[in-house]
Image (cartoon, helix red, strand yellow):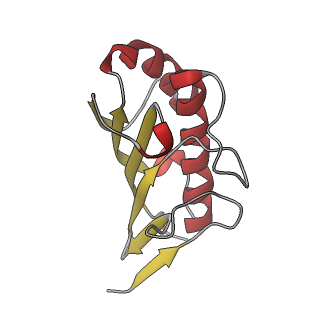
Amino acid sequence: MSVKRVIVPGLARLPAFCHATIAGDTIYVSGTLGTLPNSMQLAPGGVAGQTSQTLRNIETILRACGAGLDDLVKVNVFLADIDSFGEMNEAYLAVMGDDPPARITVGKAGLALGAAVEIDAIAYLPQQ
């Protein structure tokens, strides 16, 4: 099985992370924050703005891997404050639609850059 590390130009990351790893037909997306393009600055709008931007960043990563949001199999959401669960869900569903993948949400997480939300994911690499 081949393993490929994916780094997306213009998308923020800490040096200890690649954006994703492709192993066989599975894409493992690293924990992703709602940073603005070409920046380590978090998107405005609190948990809702950061959730939307995080999912758009994941979409960009998946595109670089040859996949899309429809190919997501499992999503893990980490919230700094579990009381923002409802607000995060609204923003999440606005991007993911009414047929989202399997998911877990964990609260009270200490996140890099003081982020309100971090999301990692597993996707299936569609046959080309």
* Nearer to us in this view, 38 or 95: 38
Q: Is residue 65 above or below residue 47?
A: below
Q: Residue at x 33, y 38 (%)?
A: 110
- Give x and y (percent) for residue 9: 69, 67
Q: Is residue 128 left or right of residue 87?
A: right
* Nearer to us in this view, 23 or 80: 80
* Rendering quarter of residue 125: bottom left
Q: Residue at x 51, y 32 (%)?
A: 96
- Give x and y (percent) for residue 71: 46, 51
Q: Residue at x 42, y 72 (%)?
A: 22
Q: Is residue 48 above or below residue 113?
A: above
Q: Residue at x 51, y 70 (%)?
A: 15
Q: Is residue 48 left or right of residue 103?
A: right
- Give x and y (percent) for residue 23: 36, 75
- Give x and y (percent) for residue 34: 57, 40
Farthest-out residue, bottom: 2
* Rendering quarter of residue 8: bottom right
Q: Is residue 27 left or right of residue 96?
A: left
Report the quarter where the C terminus lies: bottom right
